[in-house]
Amino acid sequence: MTHQVWHDPVTEEHYICNQCGADITSDPWGHINNSLMNGGNCGSYHSTYVTVKQGYYETVTDKAAWDEQVLVSKAWDETVTTGYKCSSCGATK
């Protein structure tokens, strides 16, 4: 049996130059400085959210549940001392 699972779109905040419209997310101030040093007029930017991965449906196959027994370690017999008895007087502790 299968069913559909929805995965939401993935968005990221990006910085866009207000003058030339370039995506300057990686280095906004470097873009502005480079523009001004080369006679350009880029001087400000704004942020916007950009979809970097569209939402989508995924088909998932359902698997039957099962009980599985797993041997963690082999069983063993153990002698447990629960008290002591004096062999000469018979007192117990």
Image (spheres, helix red, strand yellow):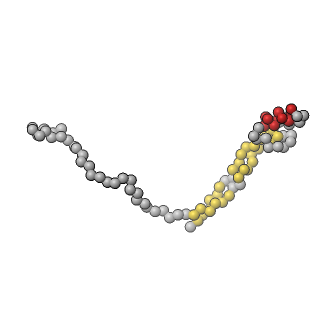
**Above or below — where is 1 with respect to 18?**
below
Q: Tell me: 36 left or right of 85.
A: right
Residue visible at 26% across and 49% down? 78
Residue visible at 86% across and 32% down? 37
Residue visible at 13% across and 39% down? 86
Instruction: Looking at the picture, tell me which residue is in the foreground, 4 or 23.
Output: 23
Q: Tell me: 87 left or right of 8.
A: left
Residue visible at 82% across and 33% down? 33
Q: Is residue 48 visible?
A: yes
* Quadrant where the image shows the C terminus: top left
Q: Tell me: 9 left or right of 29.
A: left
Instruction: Looking at the picture, tell me which residue is in the foreground, 24 or 3.
Output: 24
Residue 21 x %, y %: 84, 43
Specify the quadrant of the image occupied by residue 28: top right
Residue 30 x %, y %: 79, 35
Q: Is residue 47 visible?
A: no
Q: Tell me: 81 left or right of 75.
A: left
Specify the quadrant of the image occupied by residue 84: top left
Residue 49 x %, y %: 74, 46
Number of numbered markers: 0
- Among all residues in the image, which is located at the extreme bottom? 1
* Quadrant where the image shows the N terminus: bottom right
- Among all residues in the image, which is located at the extreme left? 89
